[in-house]
Amino acid sequence: MTAKPIPDLHLTLASASPRRRELLARLGIEPDAVAPADIDETPRKDELPRDYAVRMAREKALAVAADGFVLGGDTVVAVGRRILPKAEDEATARRCLELLSGRRHRVLSAIALRAPDGSLRERLNETVVRFKRFSDAEIGAYLASGEWHGKAGGYAIQGAAEGLVVWLQGSHSGVMGLPLYETRTLLVSAGFALG
Ligand SMILES: Cc1cn([C@H]2C[C@H](O)[C@@H](COP(=O)(O)OP(=O)(O)OP(=O)(O)O)O2)c(=O)[nH]c1=O
């Protein structure tokens, strides 16, 4: 007889991002299900980057119908109060890189966990990153790499972009999409049994 799964112990990752899954695996966690949340990701008028990141993580965790725990996450790159887009085309990626060149920016990475009793817990990681001042050749080479595609702020720190980072204060995993310290403490505080 096959043992019936216990729904309360299930974890669903409400994300289409393969990086979030890889980062979760570093905590020894393999989600029982991966179910991308289909939500409207348009920022509200005058919404602050950190409020937007937390709201998106929360909406993702709430949008997925599943038993057990549901984990949502959202990563936002911000320059001051300005939320940078996810770069879906080269022109957008170029604009992001020109804006980020030689200056500090913030990466807000929020996570939200819906527990089996329906309660919701959230955590936010804020990391400050400073890139070198980019030459035209560096921007050209980075755009040619295609690594910017689908990434908030038009770069991926897990690739060649890290070679352009002068300084970072905060969480490397947070910039990639899932801040591991916050994720671990959130799961522990909700009573999720870590391996
Ligand atoms: C800044 C930065 C962002 N990113 C990625 C992480 C996220 O996947 C993406 C930000 O978009 P998100 O909306 O946070 O995530 P997503 O659309 O990829 O997946 P889902 O909404 O289904 O969870 O940018 C990197 O991979 N590396 C980086 O250095």
Image (cartoon, rainbow, N blue to C red):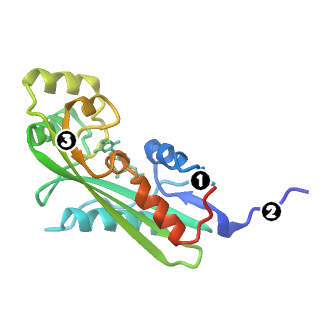
The residue labelled by disc 3 is 167
Sequence-earlier tag: 1 or 3: 1
Residue type at numbered disc 2: Lys
Q: Is residue 82 above or below residue 135?
A: below
- Of labels 1 and 3, the one closer to you: 3
Question: x and y percent of residue 108 in the render?
Answer: 27, 57
Using residue 13 as the reference point, say whether residue 76 is left or right of it. Answer: left
Evaluate if marks 2 and 1 touch, with contact meaning CB atoms under 8 Å apart. no
Q: Secondary structure at mark 3?
A: strand
Residue 117 in sight from this viewpoint: yes
Residue type at numbered disc 3: Trp
Q: Is residue 14 above or below residue 102?
A: below
Question: Crowding near pointer 2: few (<14 within 10 Å), some, many (20+)?
Answer: few
- Residue 71 shows which numbered tag? none
Using residue 157 as the reference point, say whether residue 84 is left or right of it. Answer: left
Evaluate if marks 3 and 2 touch, with contact meaning CB atoms under 8 Å apart. no
Q: CA distance from mark 2 to mark 1?
A: 17 Å
- The answer to which of 111 and 118 lies nearer the viewer is 111
Residue at the image point whose x is 31% and y is 41% from the top: 150
- Residue 4 shows which numbered tag? 2
Residue at the image point whose x is 41% and y is 61% from the top: 182
Check the picture and name the quadrant holding the N terminus. Answer: bottom right
- Of labels 3 and 2, the one closer to you: 3
Q: Secondary structure at mark 1?
A: loop
Residue type at numbered disc 1: Pro
Q: CA distance from mark 1 to mark 3?
A: 33 Å
Residue 63 in sight from this viewpoint: no
